[in-house]
Amino acid sequence: MKSLLAAILLIALLSCNNNSNTRPAMYKTTGAIIPYDEALSAIADTAARAEIIAEGFEWSEGPLWLEKQQMLIFSDVPANTIYKWTEEKGKEVYLKPSGYTGSEPSVCKEPGSNGLTLDNNGNLVLCQHGDRKMARMDAPLDKPEAKFITIADKYNGKRFSSPNDAVFNKAGELFFTDPPYGLQTQDDTDPKKEIQHNGVYKVKTDGSVILLTDSITRPNGIAFFPDEKRLLVANSDPAKPNWYVFDINGDALANGKIFYSAAGQSEGLKGLPDGLKIDRNGNVFATGPGGVWIFNPEGKVLGKIKLDEATSNCALSPDEKTLYITNDMYVLRVKMRK
């Protein structure tokens, strides 16, 4: 009798579960959104969590959402590979090699592509560490091939160190950063470093290259504010963990100042100021110590997406409701708003 009652109870429980509208989460989650200001509620639901949508990478970087393809692409820099992720198939190799195309094995720790972006014609543009250049993939997005056209590889006849992150303005001019992380020693003493400073550059539509500033010790993430009158640049230097903002004055930058400094706030936290994105309202999503920092346009911290592993970059969906984050060995998705 007891066995019969137990069986009936089990069937009833299973029936309740089958009729439930809830289902197990598809992805593991990590981290938490920590509010610092009530204004964050208009940007992100603080109850949201970061979903681990892909994992198993050496150092993930450069996320880029392709809306037409409903696909995220991103670099694994040490692996010299770009991966793609879709909801249907998960992660797959998208392009290899991505940043170093030489015939001999690379001696660098991070030879692959880093930042990825689209030019104003919808072509994939890559920051190539190993080949030390900005390049455009000479193939459609839905039929990728490791064929590249050089956009810029030198300044005043000297090779770049390792272009890191990039953004186009509405006029089709390319702005990018060039720290030494793609060189063998990853520092300024590397014997193959040809340009002594670490610069922020602009490539005009005629192909000419302009040095915008050499004042940032480790220039990294880069983005425009919506009116394209100000440029934000991250500095991934442990001694100066700052974000800098500049006024754009034609082919020059002016009035450079600290937008925000993480100095004294990074002890025990992984990561440094790195890749960043700015939404249409001027809010900044900046990877940095301990996760993703969210600022308003004036540099006030509204909140953080707290993460345990070092974050390298992020990307917004076109409706700006979803944030994709490259997080060391992981790629994350945060559904910030419905």
Image (spheres, rainbow, N blue to C red):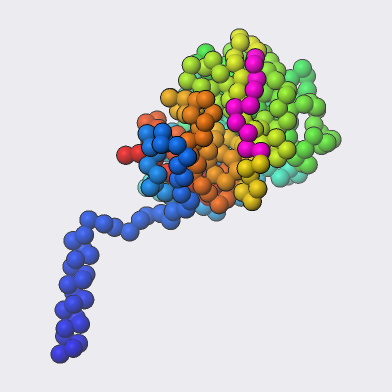
Q: Name the outermost residue toward the bottom.
A: 1
Q: Name the outermost residue toward the front.
A: 37
Q: Could you say which is closer to the camera, residue 214 or residue 293?
A: 293
- Seen at 44% across and 53% down, the residue is 29
Point out residue 280 in the picture as x, y percentages from the top left corner. Answer: 43, 24
Instruction: Work out whether residue 132 can be spotted.
Output: no
Instruction: Give the tally of numbered discs.
Output: 0
Quarter holding the C terminus?
Answer: top left
Is-magenta flag for residue 196?
Answer: no
As displayed, is residue 245 above or below residue 327?
Answer: above
- Seen at 55% across and 26% down, the residue is 223
Point out residue 123 in the picture as x, y percentages from the top left corner. Answer: 50, 25
- Is 48 left, or right, of 101 in this rendering? left
Instruction: Work out whether residue 27 can be spotted.
Output: yes
Point out residue 94 in the picture as x, y percentages from the top left corner. Answer: 51, 41
Point out residue 1 in the picture as x, y percentages from the top left corner. Answer: 15, 90
Q: Please state the extent of the stretch shown in magenta in the rendering.
A: 253-263
Q: Quadrant of residue 69?
A: top left
- Is 249 left, or right, of 34 in this rendering? right
Q: Could you say which is closer to the camera, residue 84 or residue 306?
A: 306
As displayed, is residue 207 above or below residue 162?
Answer: above
